[in-house]
């Protein structure tokens, strides 16, 4: 209680309720025989299986409303709670189990003389098993029900019974989930109708978690209905599966949880995903799904450490590209998209995570079979494709099936716990990038081709899911250079530009003409070409490098670079935030950039636009900053 003193200082007077002391716990047995059960469930799944098992053990069953009717219709013995209590269900079912004969039966301590006398004096029968799942509040809200119907689906009696039974876990078994039925039945079979103390306490812990999650959902919804942020936010998670470790082997324990009451946004079809695998999977899936929606083309991404090494859509290959990428003769749209994504930066894509926007077919699986990768996420797989992928890496290749219709039951706000702080922000996945956003052209040159618009959208979505600061170059429906995680934007432009140089020089006649020995494997050829282009080998490295060739190649001359790079035209550059100075534009033009997409909004916008005009570039301001951390 707060009192305002004469000095104006708030003084505190604390009135604490007397803390209850533990009563005599009576006789605590490890194995407790279940003689009487109360069952009241909204989800009737496997109800009859459980009830039939209880009948076999001679368990007397009390029940309410629809549950009792279901049991009676199946010919199973049941006593209505209203007959047991002597009070009918009333007030539209709001009051049916809120009675001392119910709660006394759940809470009475076995062997406690006072409790035993109270039960005898008031005709209270002990209840050894409580089976309750709560009114479907969350699903009622999700269906868009009005306020009154949502409130009517706030369970009162159920949580009260669950908490009472859980508190009295020394003697009472509480079941709150259909998935727990089998566990209880098996234990009763193994122990002559009894459950163990360990099981009862395990189920009690799950029950308290269940009611906590239920109350959290209700309190959050009530606050939202009143236009308020909840004063206390409770997040409820369910353990989906443990992980070997987190980002590093010393980071244990590590696990994946789902939002309480909901499934994960994917299914594991093969392999055992790790912590970073799953970060890559979720980030890459968001990328390809958004690209598919925006451009209507099969999309793919190649991810490493939560950023794309490459991303692409299904655009036909030129003959030179086919040779540079060592492309198979026949490619489906999905296979084509992934081949392009993988060939943006094939050295970085070594050991990547693949993401596909469309159902994976055998052509895509067969191409992926030839590459070194950790796993894949896609909305589905043909049976043949799944069989091919499941056999990869001696059966250890990770295959995830994404749910394209998944919506988080926790709403639009993402939470992250770091160092004792909880960060909350609305996710930006639902703020989609679309082709029409590129229509605001700020330069004198307004000639924005459809191909360039496509590349602007692709590049902008790709860097939306790239660690900031980030920029990306794109052409022909594929990323050809991604610069991620730099503190200076112009450094991002330079880093990604270096990747563009390597990508374009892989199509130089001298690189295409390298004569490898037959035994040199695909990835070794990729690496050798890149080192040939980079040209900064030590004498020892070069001595090893030349062993891969039938004919030792002559080094590339400076003129090979300048002349070939001068032929690169029509490249798009996208930035996750505005360009603060014109220096990025002055660098980008060296890599064939003719189109620029950025949010705009800098005090230097005019100077950057002037630089674009000086190079006859087309620049679009789409207005959405895309930082990603």
Image (cartoon, grey):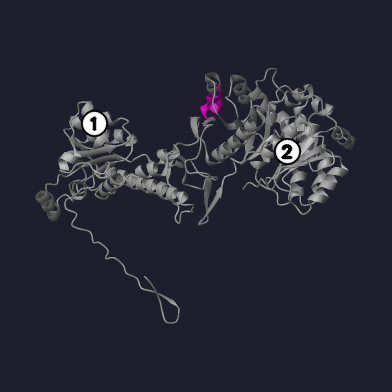
Mark yes or no: residue 516 visible. Answer: no
Q: Which residue is mark 2?
A: 438
- Quadrant hosting residue 345: top right
Q: Position of residue 153 (x, y in %)?
A: 35, 42
User: Going 62% across and 33% down the picture, which residue do you hit?
Assistant: 288
Residue 133 screen position, x and y as percent? 32, 39
**Which comes before the other along the chain, label 2 or label 1?**
1
Residue 1: percent from left, percent from top: 36, 70
Query: Which stretch did the figure color magenta?
Result: 388-397
Q: Residue sitting at 23 percent across and 43 percent down? A: 90
Q: Nearer the viewer, residue 349 or 318?
A: 318
For mark 2, give the secondary structure.
helix
How would you rate the neighbour count of disc 1 (Cα within 10 Å): few for under 14, some for 14-19, many for 20 or more?
Answer: some
Q: Is residue 223 above or below residue 96?
A: below
| Residue carrying label 1 | 69
Residue 551 on image: x %, y % = 81, 25
Q: Residue at x 85, y 46 (%)?
A: 611
Residue nearer the viewer, 396 or 577: 577
338 lies left or right of 107: right
* Residue 520 tag number: none
How far apart are labels 2 and 1 at the CA level? Answer: 61 Å
């Amino acid at each position: 209680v707060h009192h305002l003193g004469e000095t104006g200082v708030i003084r505190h007077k604390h009135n604490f309720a007397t803390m209850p002391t533990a009563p005599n716990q009576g006789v605590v047995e490890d194995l407790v025989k279940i003689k009487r059960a109360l069952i009241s469930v909204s989800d009737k799944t496997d109800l009859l299986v459980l009830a039939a098992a209880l009948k076999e053990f001679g368990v007397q069953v009390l029940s309410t409303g629809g549950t009792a009717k279901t049991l009676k219709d199946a010919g199973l013995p049941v006593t209505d709670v209203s007959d047991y209590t002597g009070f009918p269900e009333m007030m539209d079912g709001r009051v049916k189990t809120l009675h001392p004969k119910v709660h006394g039966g759940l809470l009475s301590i076995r062997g406690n003389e006072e409790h035993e006398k109270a039960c005898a004096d008031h005709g209270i029968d002990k209840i050894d098993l409580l089976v309750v799942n709560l009114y479907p509040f969350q699903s009622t809200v999700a269906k868009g029900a009005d306020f009154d119907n949502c409130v009517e689906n706030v369970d009162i009696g159920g949580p009260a019974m669950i908490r009472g039974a859980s508190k009295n876990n020394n003697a009472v078994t509480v079941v709150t989930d259909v998935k727990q039925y089998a566990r209880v039945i098996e234990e009763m079979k193994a122990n002559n109708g009894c459950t163990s103390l360990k099981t009862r306490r395990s189920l009690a812990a799950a029950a308290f978690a269940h009611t906590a999650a239920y109350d959290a959902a209700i309190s959050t919804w009530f606050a939202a209905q009143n236009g308020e942020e909840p004063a206390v936010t409770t997040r409820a998670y369910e353990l989906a599966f443990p992980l070997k470790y987190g980002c590093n082997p010393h980071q244990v324990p590590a696990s994946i949880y789902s939002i309480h009451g909901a499934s994960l946004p994917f299914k594991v079809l093969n392999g055992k995903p790790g912590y970073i695998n799953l970060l890559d999977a979720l980030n890459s899936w968001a990328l390809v799904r958004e690209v598919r929606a925006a451009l209507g083309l099969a999309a793919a991404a190649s991810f490493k450490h939560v950023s794309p090494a490459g991303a692409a859509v299904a655009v036909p290959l030129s003959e030179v590209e086919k040779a540079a990428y060592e492309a198979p003769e026949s490619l489906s749209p999905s296979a084509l998209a992934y081949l392009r994504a993988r060939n943006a930066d094939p050295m970085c894509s070594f050991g990547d995570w693949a993401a596909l926007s469309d159902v994976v077919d055998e052509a895509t699986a067969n191409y992926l079979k030839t590459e070194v990768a950790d796993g894949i996420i896609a909305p589905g797989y043909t049976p043949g494709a799944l069989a091919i992928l499941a056999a990869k890496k001696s059966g250890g290749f990770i295959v995830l099936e994404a749910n394209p219709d998944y919506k988080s039951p926790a709403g639009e706000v993402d939470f992250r716990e770091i160092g004792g702080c909880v960060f909350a922000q609305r996710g930006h996945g639902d703020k989609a990038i679309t082709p029409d956003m590129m229509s605001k052209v700020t330069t004198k040159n307004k000639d924005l081709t459809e191909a360039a618009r496509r590349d602007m959208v692709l590049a902008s979505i790709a860097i939306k899911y790239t660690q900031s600061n980030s920029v990306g170059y794109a052409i022909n429906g594929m990323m050809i250079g991604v610069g991620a995680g730099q503190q200076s934007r112009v450094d991002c432009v330079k880093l990604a530009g270096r990747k563009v140089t390597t990508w374009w020089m892989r199509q130089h006649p001298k690189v295409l003409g390298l004569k490898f020995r037959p035994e040199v494997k695909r990835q070794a050829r990729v690496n050798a070409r890149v080192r040939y282009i980079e040209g900064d080998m030590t004498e020892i490295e070069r001595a090893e490098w030349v062993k891969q060739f039938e004919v030792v190649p002559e080094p590339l001359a400076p003129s090979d670079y300048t002349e070939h790079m001068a032929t690169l035209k029509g490249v798009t550059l996208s930035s996750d935030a505005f360009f603060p100075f014109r220096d990025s534009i002055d660098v980008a033009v060296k890599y064939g950039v003719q189109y620029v997409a950025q949010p705009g909004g800098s005090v230097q916008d005019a100077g950057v636009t002037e630089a674009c005009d000086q190079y006859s570039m087309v620049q679009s301001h789409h207005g959405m900053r895309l930082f990603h951390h």
